[in-house]
Image: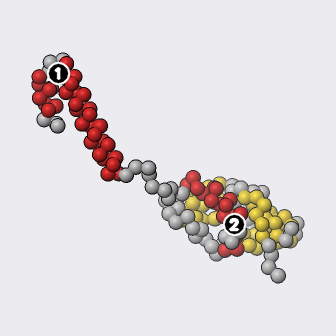
Amino acid sequence: MESMVIIKSFLPFRIGLSSSAIYVKLSVGGFVVLINGKEFHYTPNGATSIHVNRTTGEVSNKDAVFVFRHGKEEERISMYELLFCSDFLIYLQAFIKPYSPSKTTPPWDLDELDILFDQLELANIKRSIDKALDERDEATFYSLLKML
């Protein structure tokens, strides 16, 4: 009979970063699972962290095996098995989201941004021309006209 695994709590010890991965270091008291109604606590006798690809968001160490204890009883749970627990994925996503690149596009288009900068620059030149006219600065006036 296969064991039913439920995540009771998941609080990593530390989040580490590299250019390509997010490392979720596990804490002894922070990762607790329920297996067939019994509470098992993570111990660092097996894998000690979860590796997530920063670009794809996928767990890269799927072969990792984590060890949990309830008294003298010990259970080994593979990362592969944990990935099928929806609660685990929800907890994991909450911790890695601030370190993952956003999948959404920015609210502006880069071409539109270039057009906006051009418009602002033109408006600035026109204001400078008005100022040169007000101050009767003929040299500045003619040099600004060349910029239009």
Quadrant of the image for the C terminus?
top left
Residue 43: image location, x then y, percent: 76, 64
Crowd tier of the residue under label 1, counting other residues whose Cα lies within 10 Å: few below 14, some 14–19, many 20 or above: few
> Is any atom of residue 28 visible in this view?
no
Tell me the tag on residue 3.
none
Q: What type is the residue that disc 2 sits on?
A: Ser
Q: Residue at x 55, y 64 (%)?
A: 57
The residue drawn where x is 16% and y is 36% is 147
Which numbered disc, 1 or 2, marks the residue closer to the eye? 1
Amino acid type at image mark 1: Leu
Rendering coords of residue 4 (x, y %)? 80, 73
Question: Can you tell which quarter of the image residue 22 is in?
Answer: bottom right
Give above or below for 96 relative to 127. Answer: below
Q: Which residue is the site of mark 2?
A: 86
Judge left or right: residue 67 versus residue 109.
right
Give the quadrant of the N terminus.
bottom right
- Marking on residue 133: 1
- Check disc 2: other Cα within 10 Å, few if <14, some if 14-19, many if 20+: few
Is the residue 139 above or below the residue 58 in the image?
Answer: above
Q: Secondary structure at mark 1?
A: helix
Residue at 80 percent across and 75 percent down: it is 3
Q: Residue 109: where, in percent of width, then height?
A: 37, 52
In the rendered structure, are the residues bearing label 1 and label 2 in contact, judged by CB atoms less than 8 Å apart? no
Relative to 34, is 49 on the left or the right?
left
Where residue 60 appears, as percent x and y from the top left, is 58, 70
Q: Is residue 108 left or right of residue 90?
A: left
Mark 1 → mark 2, Cα distance in angstroms: 69 Å
Q: What is the quadrant of residue 100 in the picture? A: bottom right
* Earlier-in-chain disc, 1 versus 2: 2
